[in-house]
């Protein structure tokens, strides 16, 4: 014994065994990291949300990684714009109950102010749970019952027949929405049951409220509108833009893809891509002589 240390322990201390470095089996390979970073600088991805880069990788085959993995590597390169999410204080109650058994159309009015002094109101009609923009109508000065009826009727023409038997309408309690003429038209002519959110509770209509904010503050939206025509032109452009951009509420597929019934196929393909990519990384790490830690 030397200093109360056994000879065996002393030898291990004096001549420690060399440990192989460990690496997670699904750690991205260097070329994949480069592909993620390079994708952020492509012209079509500049200034767009992180989800666009994630979808770009899967669609082009440049890389296959989860959204959080893409975020982590871009964050390490200081390429992610800081964002502080706002905490929600209320839950969506009524609309979620409806979505358990129905497809739901939601509609509202959103004011666009022009420099000519004329207010233009957009009247979007969304189909949930697909977040698909069926139609976006408009009104000048204010929204009447007739404007709501026209917008919903036009949107109704774009709904496939197999959806119409399980369709419900949901809106806030604005005067145009709960007007007798509006309710009679929806319940009678279109045979759509109508439901309303709680008074003074915009969170109950969170889907359409979020859409209105997106339509006004989208990255491609004009800073200001000179005339009524400028607003109407933007609404036409925005419908196609919105329906063909990945949406966080439907697992980053586009509303158009979800409406066409392609959501599950796309998500399954992404899952298979991630599994295949993880296997490639695992084999590459093992071939490099690294000890792999599988969680």
Image (cartoon, helix red, strand yellow):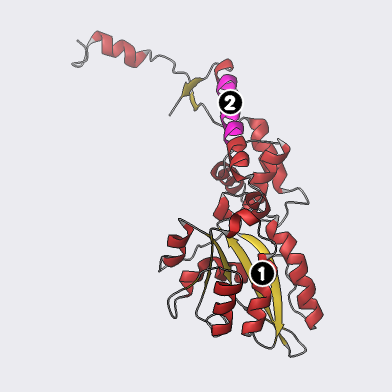
The residue shown at (58%, 42%) is 264
Farthest-out residue, bottom:
117
Q: Is residue 80 left or right of residue 244?
A: left
Question: Residue 17 location in percent, x, y?
Answer: 40, 14
Q: Can I make out residue 162 in this image?
A: yes
Kindly report the secondary structure that dominates the magenta region of the rendered protein: helix
Q: How many marks?
A: 2
Nearest to the observer: residue 248 or residue 183: 183
Q: Is label 1 in a helix, a strand or a loop?
A: helix
Nearest to the observer: residue 132 or residue 177: 177
Which image quarter is the N terminus in? top left
Pointer 2: what residue?
281
Any magenta on residue 234?
A: no
Considering only vertical position in the picture, is 254 above or below 241?
A: above
Question: Residue 78 location in percent, x, y?
Answer: 61, 51
Pointer 1: what residue?
215
Numbered tag placed on residue 4 in the rendering: none
The residue shown at (63%, 85%) is 144
Image: magenta residue range: 271-285
**Label 2 vs label 1: CA separation?**
41 Å
Question: Residue 168 location in percent, x, y?
Answer: 53, 65
């Amino acid at each position: 014994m030397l200093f109360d240390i056994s000879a065996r322990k002393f030898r291990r201390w004096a001549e420690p065994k060399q440990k192989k470095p460990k690496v997670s089996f699904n750690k991205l390979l260097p070329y994949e990291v480069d592909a993620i970073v390079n994708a952020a600088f492509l012209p079509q991805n500049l200034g767009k949300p992180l989800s666009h880069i994630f979808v770009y990788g899967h669609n082009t085959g440049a890389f296959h990684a989860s959204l959080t993995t893409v975020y982590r590597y871009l964050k390490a390169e200081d390429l992610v714009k800081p964002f502080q999410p706002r905490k929600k204080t209320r839950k969506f109650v009524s609309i979620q109950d409806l979505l358990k058994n129905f497809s739901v159309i939601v509609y509202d009015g959103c004011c666009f102010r022009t420099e000519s002094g004329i207010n233009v109101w957009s009247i979007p009609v969304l189909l949930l749970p697909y977040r698909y923009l069926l139609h976006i109508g408009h009104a000048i000065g204010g929204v009447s019952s007739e404007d709501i009826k026209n917008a919903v009727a036009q949107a109704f023409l774009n709904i496939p027949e197999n959806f119409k038997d399980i369709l419900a309408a949901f809106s806030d309690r604005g005067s145009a929405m709960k007007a007798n003429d509006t309710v009679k038209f929806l319940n009678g002519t279109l045979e759509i049951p109508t439901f309303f959110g709680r008074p003074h509770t915009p969170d109950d209509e969170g889907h359409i409220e979020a859409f209105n904010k997106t339509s006004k503050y989208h990255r491609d939206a004009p800073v200001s509108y000179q005339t009524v025509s400028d607003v109407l032109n933007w609404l036409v452009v925005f419908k196609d833009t919105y329906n063909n951009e990945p949406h966080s509420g439907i697992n980053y597929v586009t509303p158009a893809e979800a409406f066409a019934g392609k959501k599950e196929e796309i998500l399954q393909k992404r899952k298979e891509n991630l599994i295949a990519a993880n296997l490639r990384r695992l084999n590459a790490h093992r071939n490099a002589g690294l000890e792999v830690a599988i969680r």
